[in-house]
Image (spheres, grey):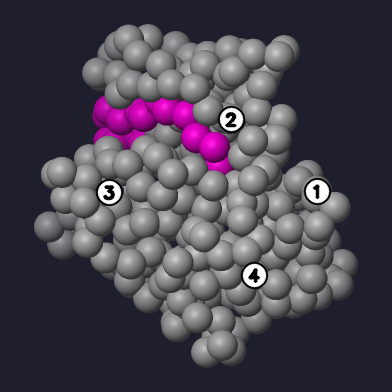
Amino acid sequence: MVFSLFIASLPILISAQDVSKTCFACASTSLRSRWSLTGLPPVPDSYFSSCDDTTSVVTTEPCSGPCFTLLFDDPDTITSGGTMQATALVVRGCHSTLMQVAADRTSSTGTYCEYDSNHMAANSKGNIVSIKMLMEFCSSSSCNNRPAQNGYTQNPVCSQQTNNNLINGKPLDCYECTPQPGKNCWDSKCTKKYCMKQVISIKNGWQIQKTCSNINIYGIDNYCQTFDLITNPGGMAVKNRYQQCYCKDKQYCNSTPTHRIITVIMVTLATFWL
């Protein structure tokens, strides 16, 4: 593999013996060398197979929690003008196995789905682009079968991004900026269901992106996950520490000062909404 990801001491919150169904378990083959685009912990090599259409997916895994689908536009195919050139990417699996955390999302229909038509994400070069992204939980065996192509408009249509999207009756404001080294940033804002922060520790420095999103891949309102990210720029392996956080407990909850970021980034499950 071109790179690897490693989880640092994640707590096991789901019993391996408590399984009640199976889920499709696969990922678009082009993600094998670009797994950092997903923001997810590592998966086995066996995941990278035909995944767009589940009629050809043969890999499944037992699951004690919801089955999971993550569908998103390939950020590496966005042109400078924002034009989409290629198809969507997809990851499927058992959410509790992928994340090692128990999501608390429920729905009377058995499906919980969030969609963001303007999700800000980094491409492989670190440039921030706008993409479409969809995240879906479902509760029956092999239910994570939403097709990759035209999946954003397939039934059931995502609507939960509009549920519980206020805080004390007001829209949630978040910081949206990329701080310079040694400085925090509060220069612009955005308003969506969740505030979000991504931190990459690179040798003696760091890179931060603050933004907002209508999607929370962890299925928990206030949560961080940290893991090691090894990339190979120019064929040389470089080890970085990657942290991704979601919060919605107060206005501008992604506002942790820089000196606190450097402290919490070394903790596997850290909170930053202090």
| Res. 59 visible in picture | yes
Q: Nearer the viewer, residue 224 or 121?
A: 121
Task: Give the residue at x 32% y 10%.
Answer: 187
Report how far apart the C-alphas of labels 2 and 3 lie in the structure. Answer: 23 Å
Secondary structure beneath dot 3 equals loop
**Is 147 situated left or right of 68 in this image?**
left
Q: Position of residue 15 (x, y in %)?
A: 83, 61
**Is 81 situated left or right of 274 in this image?**
left
- Can you identify the residue that label 2 sits on? 193
Report how far apart the C-alphas of labels 4 and 3 lie in the structure. Answer: 25 Å
Q: Residues within 10 Å of mark 3 (few under 14, many from 20)?
A: some
Q: Position of residue 162 (x, y in %)?
A: 64, 35
Report how far apart the C-alphas of labels 1 and 2 lie in the structure. Answer: 17 Å
Report how far apart the C-alphas of labels 3 and 1 lie in the structure. Answer: 31 Å
* Tag 2 and tag 3, C-beta contact below 8 Å: no
Report how far apart the C-alphas of labels 4 and 1 lie in the structure. Answer: 15 Å
Please tell me the numbered disc located at residue 106: 1
Q: Residues within 10 Å of mark 1 (few under 14, many from 20)?
A: some
Q: Position of residue 203 (x, y in %)?
A: 27, 36
- Give the mark nearest the N terminus, 1 or 2: 1
Q: Amino acid at mark 2?
A: Lys
Please tell me whether the stretch drawn in magenta is mainly helix, strand or loop.
Answer: strand
Q: Residues within 10 Å of mark 4 (few under 14, many from 20)?
A: many
